[in-house]
Image (tube, helix red, strand yellow):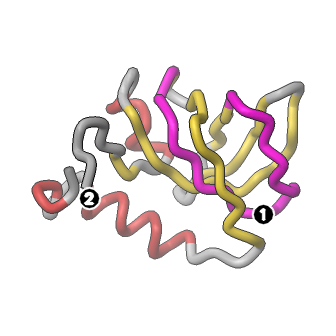
Amino acid sequence: MDTSSPTVFVNGELLKLYMGRRVRTVVQVIRNEGGAVVGQSTDNQQLTVKGPNQSVPVMHFMEVIGVADGPQSIRAEICTDFGSNFDTASYNGLCKLANGQFKNLFL
């Protein structure tokens, strides 16, 4: 397992704590805006994903791995279409655990 560049599980609220660092999150695509995707995080915050041309359809969930370059934006390295059915409450809970009580288990 490569631990040289770990990614932190984040939701919209936690993103601002990791500015300049590699993060991983899931957003529901709301719209495409000139090379960027505007999406809703699992804790209902609006995030902007910039980077490679994402071809994920509107209303689908998309996993994003990239660098947090603003309190509500990510410069994407990898985007993966998770489809139209995703358990946002479970993912949001994972983000809270990975940044709280069980932080030591998550690089």
The magenta span reads: 50-69
Q: Position of residue 90 (x, y in %)?
A: 45, 75
What residue does disc 1 label?
A: 60
Name the secondary structure under disc 2: helix
Q: Position of residue 49 (x, y in %)?
A: 67, 35
Q: Residue furthest front?
A: 1
Which class describes the residues within 10 Å of circle 2: few (<14), some (14-19), or many (20+)? Answer: some
Q: Position of residue 8 (x, y in %)?
A: 34, 46
Looking at the rendered structure, the kind of residue marked 1 is His
How much space separates mark 1 and mark 2, taking CA atoms?
24 Å
Earlier in the chain: of badge 1 and badge 2, it is 1
State the image quarter where residue 57 is shown.
Answer: bottom right
The reply to whether residue 73 is visible in this rendering is no
Tell me the residue at 80%/36% (across/down). 53
Q: Position of residue 97 (x, y in %)?
A: 26, 63
Tell me the residue at 11%/56% (across/down). 104
Tell me the residue at 87%/39% (across/down). 32
Residue 33 part of the magenta-drawn span: no
The residue lying toward the viewer, choosing from 5 and 8, is: 5
Looking at the rendered structure, the kind of residue marked 2 is Ala
What residue does disc 2 label?
A: 98
Name the secondary structure under disc 1: loop
The residue lying toward the viewer, choosing from 86 and 16, is: 86
